[in-house]
Amino acid sequence: MKKLILTLSLLIPAAVLSAADTSSLALIPLPQKVDRLDGEFELTPLTRIYTDRASEKTGEFLAQKLRPATGYPLEVHWQAFSSKPPEGAIYLTTKGADAGLGAEGYELTASAGSVVIRAPQQAGVFYGTQTLRQLLPTDIFSTNVVAKTEWPVPGVHIRDWPRFKWRGILLDVSRHFFSKSEVETKLDEMALYKLNTFHWHLVDDDGWRIEIKKYPKLTEVGAWRMRPQLKRIEGSKETTAHPAWMAPSADKFDVGGRYGGYYTQDDIREVLAYAAARHIMIVPEIEMPGHSSAALAAYPEYSCYGGPYHTDRDLNAHEGIYDPANEQTFQFLDGVLKEVFHLFPSPYIHIGGDEVRKDYWMHSPDCQALMQREGLKDGNELQSWFLKRMEKYVNAHGKKMIGWSEILQGGLAPSATVMDWIGGGLEAASQGHDVIMTPEKDCYLDHYQSTNLLTEPLAIGGYLPLQNMYAFEPVPDKLPEAMQSHVLGAQGNVWTEYIASQQHLDYMIFPRACALAEVTWSARDARNWDDFQQRLATDEKRLDELNVNYRR
Ligand code: TNX
């Protein structure tokens, strides 16, 4: 059969081949334009990578990715070519690139003589190298030398650019902690699929994970709890599958047996550099005014009732919510954010804003007095007042504020970006606000992947099979065309109430993140479920080589 297809393909001209051949190339996300060319490029022990000055680091990154499996030296050289690179070379350059490809677009030409990746900006050169990795045989992803000598790259001309600029994954490291190296592994996998935004949910009720020098108790107290939460929370659906790999690793317990952990500011800087090398923006989230038990366990004086607050869900008497009637609450939050701004280069800060139990505010005489003073008629308006005040602080530091759907309640802060999980995206974009689409029903990577709960590891509930993720359309139907550019993109959210291990994380993220990558990168009308499944069958071999515990 294979032989027949091969013979046929030799008879059909390249242009006709391109559609059918996209599945055999198994590129994920699918590029915008692919044309097959005659012949193929061979990676050999003599292959060199040449780069222009701007692309040196990307060249070294590519070499590092290709060396383990091939065992080839793949030397990287800087060279200013006026015309063609020498025979047998891989050439990465920004010179002579088509500016129309945009900030992340690239052009890749592989032929018998060379592979040339050309892009106007470095992110594009980088994405070209990720495509090149996928064009090679899947065992190029092996971390050990593979005993073979043929590493062909099929002849191909690709012009490619993303549909959306925000292609994100949220990782909740509060409910369960993931170490610096576990986070870096995820960043590496994101880069392979051209996902470019890592939303780092650093703070929630169950743990505070970022060192703040001015407030050391946040991590001394707030980063630890009695035990990981791996049993049912009341009200969620039962399942019987508890694979051994769901358990947290030993390094998540301190000498006293407490569960948790946090990142020092040096750790954060290291992860930021790791992400930057992969053209990934990290957007930190510091939750307020709700989901703040961990902060209030450390500093109960910034709550309405004085606590006590706990990071252990079972012990929680109140939900953590800051006291907006206390000026010192704002001094505290400003102090925290100042250190966060100092660390993270991202133009964005996410301030949460979801699921605030405003009834706690309604019972506080101080909050009542504040509302009267400011003419606020209910809890929603009080929340809006709180967030508008925070936005001024955020903007004064040159940053843009993002918040969850609920920040629309009581009036949206003037320049806020809305992250839609339970609606509001359409409304906000219609009003000219930027939005990021992460609707719960389409984008929640903590939800079950099958209705047969007997075979699935414990999850919070919900149902998001791969096919639904693949079918997700980020631009709301009713959004007028003129406002569609306000949809920055989409994001898959991994909330980790029940996810304590790297393997479990893999299982929830893959292959759904591959579908998300295609939703956010590829052309809307190019989406084809059957073709995607075929490409995924090959892609799974890559994930096998990378030791990713994806859902089969
Ligand atoms: C809702 S999404 C939450 C999270 C939970 C998640 C569980 C959002 C803004 N809030 O705190 O972890 O559901 O699926």
Image (tube, helix red, strand yellow):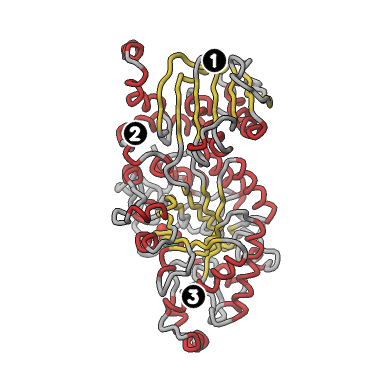
C-alpha gap between disc 2 and disc 1: 32 Å
Query: Which of the pair 188/121 is nearer the observer?
Result: 121
Query: Which of the pair 175/380 is nearer the observer?
Result: 380
Q: Amino acid at mark 1?
A: Gly
Q: Amino acid at mark 3?
A: Ala
Report whether the residue tagged 2 is closer than 8 Å to ligand 1.
no
Q: Which quadrant holds residue 37?
A: top left
Q: On the rendered structure, is 116 left or right of 240?
A: right
Residue assigned mark 2? 533
Which disc number belongs to residue 317?
A: 3
Quadrant where the N terminus sits is: top left
* For discs 2 and 1, the disc positioned in front in the rendered view: 1
The answer, for residue 548, to whether it is visible in the render is no
Q: Earlier in the sequence, mark 2 or mark 1?
A: 1
Residue assigned mark 1? 113
The secondary element bearing badge 1 is classed as: loop
Q: Is residue 405 above or below residue 451?
A: below
Q: Amino acid at mark 2?
A: Gln
For label 3, the crowd category at 10 Å Cα-Cα, with few meaning under 14, some 14 to 19 and many 20 or more, is: few
Q: Is residue 347 above or below residue 21?
A: below
Query: Which of the pair 19/240 is nearer the observer?
Result: 19
C-alpha gap between disc 1 and disc 3: 69 Å
The picture places residue 393, in percent across and down from the top left corner, at 59, 69
**What residue appears at the point 62 percent right and 55 percent down from the top-left corner?**
344
